């Protein structure tokens, strides 16, 4: 089976110099580079990845473009742009010279205002992202949920993908309100969903694949097998398990799905969404 990982990161430990992490997150304070990930990908059989922005900086975008240029297995980059920048169109114009830069993302989940994405200047920026033929990753958590469908309605021609199934609290079995949110989002054909980041929302020490299965099954039921994609969220996943454990858990949850649908979830959908050659 062909596999593309729809969501992974790199960073240097200096990123956390001025950040106080909660207990149990020390594993993140390390350098995570291509040479650390490539042997894992080769072992599992992952042919390409999507490298997703780590922090809100154009420098992060250009650093990731350089990494992608150096490693052919990085098939696409999701960078960052200041959506409120009055000159965003000029910045996005400059992005077109980098063929592997396919989309952008912002740390929406960290904004003090849950409705940040609906501000007029942000919607203006998202409309420019759509105009310039880039996609947008929605990094949302529960306080942001009600705005997911609103932004899709406000910018109907913008390809959107929900990262980490929107981060329901799997450890506490948060499901009903998540289900209602995803049911609304699934009505918008331009929205896709990443089966990623799930173990980080589960009980880090005691999670089992069966804890993820209701969310995976419902995601596929709502969005269909053509609009869901697998992502590892490495190295964030290391908070709760290895890359192999993430991959094997999703595989186990998909054991009853046919080969064609699994190929879509692990390969075809991410390749099409991020236009990976």
Image (cartoon, grey):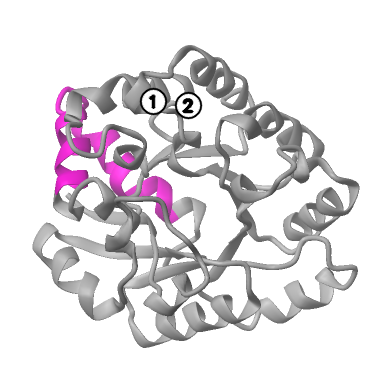
Along the horizontal axis of the image, is 245 left or right of 186? left
**Which residue is disc 1 drawn over?**
220
Q: Is residue 155 visible?
A: no
* Residue found farthest to the left: 43
- Which span is picked out in magenta? 245-271
What is the x, y in percent for residue 28?
Answer: 33, 63
Q: Main secondary structure of the magenta part?
A: helix
Local crowd at mark 1 within 10 Å, few (<14), some, or many (≥20)?
some
Q: Is residue 136 visible?
A: yes
Quadrant of the drawing holding the C terminus = bottom left
Residue 226 to residue 22: above or below: above
Q: Residue at x 29, y 77 (%)?
A: 34
Where disc 2 sits, the SS reads helix
Identify the image quadrant of residue 60. Answer: bottom right
Residue in the foreground of this view, choosing between 96 and 231? 231
Local crowd at mark 2 within 10 Å, few (<14), some, or many (≥20)?
many
Residue in the foreground of this view, choosing between 78 and 48? 78
Q: Residue at x 31, y 33 (%)?
A: 202
Q: Residue at x 43, y 35 (%)?
A: 226
What is the x, y in percent for residue 124?
Answer: 86, 53
Where disc 1 sits, the SS reads helix
Q: Was residue 257 drawn as part of the magenta stretch in this picture?
A: yes
What is the x, y in percent for residue 146?
Answer: 68, 26
Q: Was residue 151 drawn as part of the magenta stretch in this picture?
A: no
**Which residue is disc 2 drawn over?**
223
* Residue found farthest to the top: 176
Residue 32 to residue 259: above or below: below
Label 1 near label 2: C-beta < 8 Å? yes
């Amino acid at each position: 089976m062909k596999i593309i990982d729809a969501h992974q990161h790199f960073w240097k430990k200096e990123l956390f110099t001025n950040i106080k992490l909660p207990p149990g997150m020390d594993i993140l304070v390390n350098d995570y580079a291509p040479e650390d990930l490539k042997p894992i990908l080769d072992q599992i059989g992952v042919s390409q990845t999507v490298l997703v922005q780590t922090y809100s900086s154009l420098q992060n975008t250009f650093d990731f473009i350089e990494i992608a240029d150096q490693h052919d297995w990085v098939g696409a980059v999701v960078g960052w742009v200041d959506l409120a920048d009055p000159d965003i169109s000029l910045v996005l114009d400059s992005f077109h010279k980098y063929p592997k830069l396919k989309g952008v993302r912002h740390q929406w989940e960290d904004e003090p205002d849950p409705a940040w994405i609906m501000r007029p200047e942000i919607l203006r920026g998202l409309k420019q992202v759509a105009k310039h033929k880039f996609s947008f990753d929605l990094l949302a958590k529960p306080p942001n949920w009600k705005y997911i469908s609103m932004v899709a309605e406000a910018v109907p021609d913008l390809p959107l993908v929900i990262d980490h199934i929107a981060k329901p609290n799997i450890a506490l079995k948060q499901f009903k309100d998540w289900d209602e949110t995803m049911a609304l989002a699934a009505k918008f054909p331009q929205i896709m969903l990443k089966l990623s980041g799930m173990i980080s929302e589960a009980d880090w020490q005691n999670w089992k694949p069966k804890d993820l299965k209701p969310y995976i099954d419902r995601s596929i039921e709502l969005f269909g097998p053509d609009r869901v994609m697998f992502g590892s969220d490495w190295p964030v996943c290391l908070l709760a398990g290895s890359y192999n454990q993430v991959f094997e858990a999703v595989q186990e949850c998909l054991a009853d799905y046919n080969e064609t649908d699994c190929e879509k979830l692990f390969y075809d959908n991410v390749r099409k969404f991020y236009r990976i050659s």
